[in-house]
Structures are given as C-alpha cells and as structure tokens.
Image: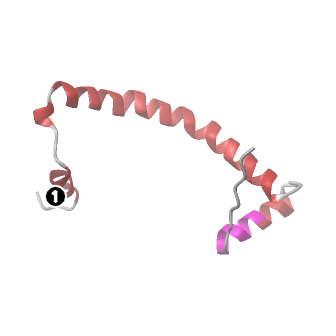
Amino acid sequence: MPELTLTLKGDAASRLERLLRTAAYPNAEAAVADALEALENNLAPELDAWLRDVVGPRLDAMRASPGTSLTADQVRARVFGKA
C-alpha cells in the first residue's frame, strides 16, 4: 500500500487537531481518510456533470469549427480587459 507523509501548519493543523478532539477519530489518518472520501463522494458527480454538460459540448463545437476558437493570448487579453 502506498504511503504519504503530509505536514500541516498553521490553521490547517489547528483544524485537524480540533477535528480529532471533537469528532472522536482514533488518529489523524482516519480523519483525513474520512475527509477525502467525503470530498470524492460530494465533488465527483458535480465534476462529471460539468465535464459532460459544459466542457464536452464546447470541445465538440471547437473541433467542428476551429476558426471560432481563441488563442491563449486572445483569452488573456479578454480576461485582463485588453481586448
């Protein structure tokens, strides 16, 4: 099984310590594993829907009509108000 060492500092470390005290986790690893599982369960459907409903159709449209796509420089100019 892979192993990862993670160092938390400041507010993140304080939040984990508080979570360990109040949520009855046996150790930091269990708390982090639970948080990661909750994150995966909550974000994966939204991410999948965004990729399917927004990104996919836009990619298909760009492929169908490449001339309507913007270059990276054009996007930067629009984002930073220089267009």
Q: Residue at x 43, y 34 (%)?
A: 50
Q: Residue at x 71, y 69 (%)?
A: 13
Is residue 65 toward the left or the right of residue 31 in the image?
left
Amino acid type, mark 1? Ala
Above or below 37: residue 9: below
Residue closest to the far bottom: 10
Residue 23 position in % (x across, y down):
84, 55
28, 54: nearer the viewer? 28
Above or below 19: residue 74: above
Q: Quadrant of the N terminus?
A: top right
Is residue 14 toward the left or the right of residue 48 in the image?
right
Is residue 44 toward the left or the right of residue 3 in the image?
left
Q: Residues within 10 Å of mark 1 (few under 14, many from 20)?
A: few
Residue 69 position in % (x across, y down):
16, 38
45, 59: nearer the viewer? 59
Q: Residue at x 79, y 54 (%)?
A: 29
Q: Secondary structure at mark 1?
A: helix
Magenta residues span 10-16
Figure label count: 1
The image quarter in which residue 41 lies: top right
Residue 82 position in % (x across, y down):
13, 62
